[in-house]
Amino acid sequence: FAISRRWFERLGRYDAGMEVWGYENVELSFRVWQCGGSLEIEPCSRVGHVFRPFSPYLPMPTLAQTRNKWRAAVVWMDGYASLVASSLGQAATFAQAGLRARLTLRESLQCHPFDWYLHHVFPEGKAELQHRAQKKNERQKEDERDNQSRTMPQQRPERLGHP
């Protein structure tokens, strides 16, 4: 991934609210696509990445990555963010503090909604997300029915010959 400094700065640089590392590439990709850019494959390009001989983040900071995934979803995926949140389990407990600046950036850049991204960039993803949303709704309805049946008083069947 390569980006010009001017475009990177105009898009708001890296999200300072992201912790350690993980999912900043996804967040930046959503931002590029939804805010008027594109990602291009350039077969003749020469881009490299220098890896350290060891990871300074051991053990892997999974909670930080989970927060980063949740943060990217809330800012860029609109209503689909709830699917990400439900898959993360604990994500609902993450504070939304610090998101206002990113949401304001999205608004000021006049970025497209996530539905636009699904329609124009990743159309095969829309069917998958709709399927997951339908399954999530079915599970919620099932849970509601289970909860109602637990809270309703049990009716005793009448015995024949006894009132």
Image (cartoon, grey):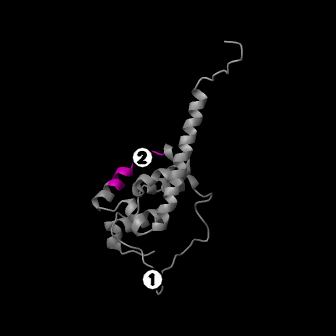
Percent from the top left, x then y, of residue 15? 41, 59
Viewer-nearest residue: 158 or 61: 158
Query: Which one is closest to the eye, mark 2 or mark 1?
Result: 1
Tell me the quarter of the image containing the C terminus: top right
Residue at 67% over, 21% down: 157
**Which quadrant would residue 39 be assigned to in this image?**
bottom left
The extreme bottom residue here reads 44
**Disc 2 secondary structure class:** loop
Crowding at mark 1 (Cα within 10 Å: few <14, some 14-19, many 20+)? few
What residue is shown with label 2?
96
Residue at 71% over, 13% down: 161
Total number of numbered labels? 2
Q: Is residue 161 above or below residue 144?
A: above
Amino acid residing under circle 2: Gln
Gap in Å between the C-alphas at discs 2 and 1?
A: 37 Å
**Any mark on residue 114, and which?**
none
Viewer-nearest residue: 89 or 9: 89
Crowding at mark 2 (Cα within 10 Å: few <14, some 14-19, many 20+)? few
Asked if the magenta segment contains residue 83, the reply would be no
Q: Is residue 116 above or below residue 147?
A: below
**Which quadrant would residue 108 be assigned to in this image?**
bottom left
Who comes first in sequence, dot 2 or dot 1? 1
Q: Which residues are magenta?
A: 94-103
Amino acid residing under circle 1: Glu
What residue is shown with label 1?
42
Residue at 57% over, 33% down: 147
Percent from the top left, x then y, of residue 5? 35, 73
Q: Is residue 129 above or below residue 33?
A: above
Percent from the top left, x then y, of residue 64? 53, 54
**Disc 1 secondary structure class:** loop
Labels 2 & 1 near each other (Cβ < 8 A): no
